Image (cartoon, rainbow, N blue to C red):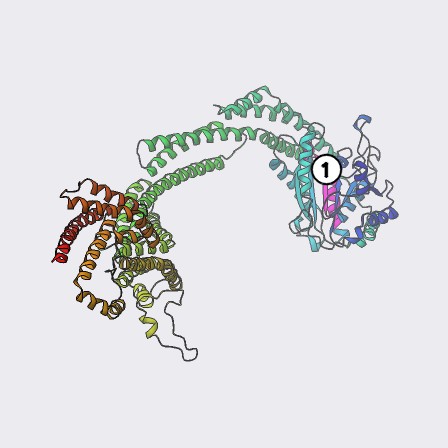
Amino acid sequence: MLMGMADECCCMQLIDGNGEFNVDGLENFVRTTKLNHCGLSYAVVAIMGPQSSGKSTLMNHLFHTNFREMDAFRGRSQTTKGIWIAKCVGIEPFTIAMDLEGSDSRERGEDDTTFEKQSALFALAIADIVLINMWCHDIGREQAANKPLLKTVFQVMMRLFSPRKTTLLFVIRDKTKTPLEYLEPILREDIQKIWDAVPKPQTLKNTPLSEFFNVEVTALSSYEEKEGQFKEQVAELRQRFFHSISPGGLAGDRQGVVPASGFSFSAQQIWRVIKENKDLDLPAHKVMVATVRCEEIANDKLRRLSADEGWLALEEAVQEGPVSGFGKRLSSVLDTYLSEYDMEAVYFDEGVRNAKRKQLESKALDFVYPTYSTLLGHLRSKAFESFKIQLEQSLKKGEGFAASVRTCTQSCMLEFDRGCADAAIRQAKWDASKVREKLRRDIDTEASSVRSVKLSAIIADHEKNLTEALSGPVESLFEVGDEDTWASIRRLLKRETEAAVLKFSTAIAGFEMDQAAVDTMVQNLRSYARNVVVKKAREEAGKVLIRMKDRFSTVFNHDNDSLPRVWTGKEDIRTITKDARAASLRLLSVMAAIRLDEKPDKVESLLFSSLMDGTAAASLPRDRSIGDSVDPLASSMWEEVSPQDKLITPVQCKSLWRQFKAETEYTVTQAISAQEAHKKNNNWMPPPWAILAMAVLGFNEFILLLKNPLYLMILFVAYLLLRALWVQMDIAAEFRHGALPGILSISSKFLPTIMNLIRRLAEEAQGQRPPEASRPQQSLASQSFRYQTPPPAGSSSIPESSVSSNISSSESEFESSGLNLIRRRSTNIPEAESS
C-alpha cells in the first residue's frame, strides 16, 4: 500500500539546496501525473516554517504524500533540502503539495538566509494556499513566528508580482490549553501590524491586507504526545482542502492563475526573477534578543502558574461546583506571577517588555478563563434549576402562570448576580452579561416551553371533548338524513362550540396573553369544531351509497307502523318503490354539500327534478347542432355551493343514483315475484275461457244429467267424496310448495285417507262415533310432512300454526256434514229403486 501511495504521489525535488531548478524533473512530474490535462482545475499548497518543526510530517498526514521525515532518534538536523513537490493523494481537484526547506537551520548558518527568503517568496508567488507552521509557544516571537520573513515577503511580493490573493493558513502546532479563539486574535494582530509597517507603492498605499491574502488560523495537538488526537485533527483539516478552488473554498480568488499546461514554464520564470533579487534584510538583533528573552521569562511564569498548588486546588474545586471567594483567591495568584515578571524583565527593551507583559497577562487570563467560565456555568445551571423547581411548585399551588414566571425569574436572576460579583477578579473586567443573557434566554425558553405544554394540554383536552361531543351526534343526524339534518347539525355545532369556548377562555385566563393571541386560539378552536363536522361529513359522504340502500330497504320493506311488509297482492309496489327512492334521494341531497353557513341551494330540487321527476331533462332546450339535451347534472360544481363545501359532485350523484337503482332493482323484482306467487297460490279457479269451453263442450252431458237424476245423484256423491278428500288431505297447502312435492305428499297419504273415510262411514252406519283423538293425530301427521319444506320468500308473516289449526277445524266440520249427507243419500237411493 505504501509503495502504491509513493508511486501515486510522484514525489520529486523541484529546487535543490543550491537553488538549481529541476526542469526535467518537473516536466516528468507533469507528464506522469497528467497535470497538463487539468486546465485551470488544480491548486498548489505550500508549507513553510522553522527547521524540524514537523512540516514534512504534517504534509504526509494531511495529503498522504511521502516526503522524507526527520528521525528523532538520530538527532535534530536538516531533513528537507531545497523545495520538494508531490501530488496530493485522494484530493479533488488535482492538488500539488510543496514542502519547503526549514528556516533558521543550523546547516546554513546565521548569515546564509538568502535561500530561505527566496523559497518563502517562491511559495507565496506560486501557491494558492501557504501553510505557515509554528509552535504554539512561539506565537508573539519575532523570529520564531517568521514575522521578519513575512515582512520582507510582503514588500517584495508587491514589488515583483501583480496582486494575487493567496490564503495564509497558520498552523499552530502542539496546541496548549489556551483556546484557539484567544490565540487567533493575537496572531492576526501581528500579521496586520507587519502589513501596515511594510512600505508600499503609492498605488497600493491604502490597500488592505485582505486584497492580497486570506488569513486563516488552525491549531493541532502534539504529534508525539497525542498522536491519536493529532491524526483526528489532521483528518478534519484535510476535509477543508477538498474542492478548495470552488467558490467559498479555502483557496484565494484564483485571479491570474496560469493553465496547467503552462505551470512548468511559469514556475521556472518566477524562480529566475526571485533569484535575481537579493535586497532582503532581517530585523534588528537587539529587538530579537529582547523578544526571545522576554518570551522565555513570560513562558516560565505561565508554566509556574499552571503548576501552582493554590491554583490547582481552586480549579479542582470549581469543577465540582460554585466556589465562594473565587475572585479574591484567583486575583492573589495572578498578582504573584505578574510581579515576578516585572522584576526579571526590567532591563530589557521597554517596548518589547511591555508587549510581552501584556501577552503574559493575556495568556494567563486566557489560561484561567475556562475555569471562570465553568464557574459561571455552575452559577447559571444552579439558578436555572432553581427557577424550574420554583415554577413547578408555584403552579401546583394554583397560582397564575404569568405571575409565577415573573416571581421566579426575579428571584433566580438576583441569585445569579450575587454569584457573579463574588467571582470577579481585579486583573480583568470580565463581562458576565453574555452568561446572564443566556440564563435569561434559558428561563424564557423554559417558561415558553412550559407554557406551550400547558396550553397544548388545554387545547388538546378541549379538542378531545369537542370531538366526543360532535362526532357521535353528527353521525346519527346523517343517518336520519331528512330536511332538518343540517339545521340540527348547525344548532349542535353552535351549542357545543360556545360551551367549549367559554371553558377554554376560563382555562387560559392565568396565562395573561394579549387579546389578539386569545382571539386566534379561540378562532382555532372554532375552526377545529367546524373541521370535526366537515371531516365527519366527508366520511359519511363516502358511505352514502350504503346509507341510501339501507334507507330504501327500510322504507320499501316496512309499512308506516314500521312492521315488516307482507306482499299479498294488494300493495301498490310502484308507489312504494317511488317513496323509497325519494327517501334515498333526499338522503343523497343531504350528503351532496356542506351546509354550515345557512346558504340556500337548489341541490335537492335539482336532484329530484333530474333523477326522480324526469321533467328537467324533458324541459331543457336541445342544441340544434348536436341534437342532445343539456344535462343539469353534467357538471363538477353545484350552483350556489362553494368548492370547499362540495362533498359529492353532480356527476358523482348521477353515477351513484345509477348504481343505487341497479343494486336495488333486485329487491323490487323480488317483491313483484312474491305478489305473483301469492296470487297463484290463492287462485284455483280455471281461466274464464276454460269455463266457457267446458260449458259449450259439456252441454250435452249436462242435459243428460238433468234427464237422469240417478247420474246427478252419483255425481253429487262423488263431488262430496272428492271434497272430503280435498279438505282431509289439504291439497291447496300441499301444492303451495310446488307441484312435485305436492304430488309426492298426496300419493303417500291418498290410500290411508280413503281407508279412514271408509272406516268412518262404516262406523257411522253402525251408529258409533269415531274417536276424536284420531283426528288430531291424523292432522298432525299430515302437517308434519308439509313442514318439511321451507316456506317460500315473501310468504305471509302470520304464524303457520294458527293457519293450520283454522284449516283443521273447518275441515272437521265440513267432513262431518259431508259424511252425514252421503249416508242419507245412500239410504234414500234403495228406497227410490224399490218404489
Percent position (x, y) of residue 526?
Answer: 32, 50
Q: Nearer the viewer, residue 664 or 194?
A: 664
Q: Residues within 10 Å of mark 1 (few under 14, many from 20)?
A: many
**Where's residue 285, x and y in %?**
76, 35
Look at the picture and state if 251 lies above or below 677: above
Residue in the image at 73% along x and 36% along y: 61
Please indicate, yes or no, whether residue 154 appears anywhere in the rendered image.
yes
Is-magenta flag for residue 194?
Answer: no
On the image, which quarter does residue 5 sit in?
top right
What residue do we see at 35% from left, 72% from top? 617
State the residue in front, 625 or 331.
625
What amino acid is found at the position of numbered circle 1 in the picture? Answer: Asn
Residue 175, quarter of picture: top right
The quarter in which the N terminus is drawn is top right
Indicate the quadrant containing the C terminus: top left, top right, bottom left or bottom right: bottom left
454 or 660: nearer the viewer: 660
Boundaries of the magenta span: 128-157
Q: Nearer the viewer, residue 556 or 696?
A: 696
Q: Is residue 144 magenta?
A: yes
Q: Is residue 276 visible?
A: no
In the depicted structure, whether residue 174 falls above or below residue 826: above
Extreme bottom residue here? 624
Q: Position of residue 410 (x, y in %)?
A: 38, 34
| Count of residue discs | 1
Looking at the image, the residue that sits furthest to the top is: 309
Q: Say what secondary structure mark 1 lies in.
A: strand
541, above or below 4, in the image:
below
The residue that mark 1 highlights is 133
Residue extending farthest left: 835
Q: Position of residue 641 (x, y in %)?
A: 34, 63
